[in-house]
Amino acid sequence: MNNINDLSNSVIFPKGKKIADGTFTGDAWAEMLVPMSFLYNCSIANVTFAPGSRNHWHKHPGGQILLITGGAGFYQEQGKPARAIKAGDVVQVPVNVSHWHGAAPDSWLVHLSITTNPARGNLQWQQPVTDAEYPGHPG
Amino acid sequence: MNNINDLSNSVIFPKGKKIADGTFTGDAWAEMLVPMSFLYNCSIANVTFAPGSRNHWHKHPGGQILLITGGAGFYQEQGKPARAIKAGDVVQVPVNVSHWHGAAPDSWLVHLSITTNPARGNLQWQQPVTDAEYPGHPG
């Protein structure tokens, strides 16, 4: 972990539990800050990615907003190049567009996710991001 | 500013412009991170309060969620005691309940505000929080 800003305790909000449902490549953790609520029409989670980790391609029927609170990584929509993201950035994920997000190979990444419009349906998981798709992969 | 953790540059997200519409007591700044959007059914702002500053009593017809990202302060709903809030706390503001939030007398406060359900109507401003209502006021 030389030269990597250590965000292994997350940033500001709790790190939560390790994600172990097979929807991520590498190690990541999530804490629900606001459970899915029809009152607020959203849920809010804090997600912490170890260097190199990323979620699988997926879609949100109701959209999602990412507020990057620490580190650096990537966000990619299907058919577009991966975009570098870092603390202070905001990503508006369009409805029903396949995409993924995760840490850079040499950095932790922490973001808040606001998942909107729960009545439009649940997140739809797709295939893993391959090493060939992942930017900066050494192999 | 002795012994006060200086958050005058805000935390992670841009500080934005000084709020000058007469709805706050003291100095505060706001940056819209996501403008009000019917697509996402919310807006998101970063709000930075100087020590001692607070907004007026107000209500949200569609509710609001506060994610405290820095410093310490207070949140109070009408008819209840003021509650201390600090970085890492989450406040779910109920629909149409009069409340206010702001910094402690001796601390900056920074929070993200997720204002939900815009179709239910705009924020309704009420009277200022008096010095007698504000916790820790020396007078």
Image (tube, coloured by chain):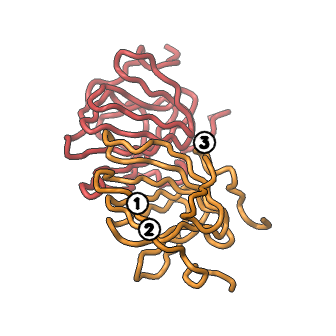
Chain colours: A red, B orange
Please state the chain letter of the residue tagged with numbered disc 2 in the rendered image: B
- Kindly check if marks 3 and 2 are in contact, taking CB atoms under 8 A apart as contact: no
**Dot 3: element:** loop
* Position of residue B109 in the picture relative to residue B32 (left or right): right
- Amino acid type at circle 3 is Asp
Q: CA distance from mark 3 to mark 2?
A: 40 Å
- Which residue is the site of mark 3? A6
Towards the viewer: A85 or A28 = A85
Please state the chain letter of the residue tagged with numbered disc 1 in the rendered image: B
Question: At x 61% / y 68%, what residue is drawn?
Answer: B25
Towards the viewer: A46 or A77 = A77
Horizontal and vertical percent for residue B20? Answer: 61, 57
Towards the viewer: B20 or A69 = B20
- Which residue is the site of mark 1? B123
- Which residue is the site of mark 2? B58
- Amino acid type at circle 1 is Leu
- Amino acid type at circle 2 is His
Res A94 quadrant in image: top left
